[in-house]
Amino acid sequence: MRKNNGGHGGVIINISSLAGLTPAAYQPVYSASKHGVIGFTRSIAALASIGNYGVRINSVCPAFVDTPLLESIEKEENMGELFKYKDRIKDMMKCYGVLDPSLIAKGMIDLIEDDASNGAVMKITTSRGIHFEEFGVQQKTKI
Ligand SMILES: NC(=O)C1=CN([C@@H]2O[C@H](COP(=O)(O)OP(=O)(O)OC[C@H]3O[C@@H](n4cnc5c(N)ncnc54)[C@H](O)[C@@H]3O)[C@@H](O)[C@H]2O)C=CC1
Ligand SMILES: CCCCC/C=C\C=C\C(=O)C/C=C\C/C=C\CCCC(=O)O
């Protein structure tokens, strides 16, 4: 895929979560993995820019989305000792709302079409729709 390796370039979008930017008390391991996705995305995006890969790498961080994943909290085998908190997670879904998957698709198309976005961290919530996390260190670099 890398232009400097015989490829044609392109766009990679890594799927993180709002739980990759905020603490998630009832999903600590999930949250840690999603924080890792963001760190990896931003780092490899910086390398892609330095190395002239012609590949843009971005990440998307949705809040709750209406998919079968949300049903996973109903199973003790998934939640382990945190199963006792499942009603608190359901309360959060009621409080913040649940996004339609079509909005995540729109956000991803926006990232594909925006050739100025590399290393961007897109957030998608019911309250603010599609928007971006701002970091102190430059997050977007043109490729
Ligand atoms: N649904 C939500 O509220 C949110 C989901 N996300 C993220 O979005 C991504 C997609 O999640 P959903 O569509 O909601 O989940 P989902 O559970 O509805 O779909 C996940 C899909 O991944 C497939 N899959 C699982 N393990 C796999 C493997 N080892 N190799 C290949 N395919 C595998 C499953 O068969 C399933 O089709 C995940 O990374 C999730 O963490 C992020 C924020 C919110
Ligand atoms: C084994 C546990 C995995 C369970 C995964 C289930 C759901 C995953 C959901 C998410 O990734 C969404 C994460 C966090 C949303 C948190 C808060 C929403 C705040 C919204 C807002 O500020 O408007």
Image (cartoon, grey):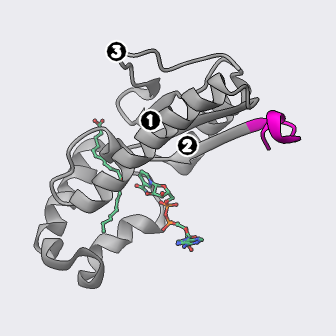
Where, quadrant-wise, is the C terminus in this rendering? Answer: top right
Compare marks 2 and 3 and give the one earlier in the sequence.
2
> Which span of residues is magenta-colored?
1-10
Disc on res. 104: 2
Q: Amino acid at mark 2?
A: Ile
Give the residue furthest to the bottom.
Answer: 77
Viewer-closest of 129 and 142: 142
Measured in 3D between alpha carbons, the distance from the residue under mark 2 to the one under mark 3, in whole angstroms, is 25 Å
Q: Amino acid at mark 1?
A: Ile
User: Residue 39 at x, y = what percent?
Assistant: 41, 39
User: From the viewer's perspective, is residue 122 above or below residue 117?
Assistant: below
Measured in 3D between alpha carbons, the distance from the residue under mark 1 to the one under mark 3, in whole angstroms, is 20 Å
Tell me: 142 left or right of 93: right
Tag in front: 2 or 3: 3
Disc on res. 136: 3
* Secondary structure of residue under mark 2: helix
User: Residue 42 at x, y = what percent?
Assistant: 48, 33
Q: Which residue is mark 1?
A: 124
Measured in 3D between alpha carbons, the distance from the residue under mark 2 to the one under mark 1, in whole angstroms, is 7 Å
* Secondary structure of residue under mark 1: strand
- Mark 1: few/some/many CA within 10 Å (<14, 14-19, 20+): many
Compare marks 1 and 3 and give the one earlier in the sequence.
1
User: From the viewer's perspective, is residue 86 above or below residue 125?
Assistant: below
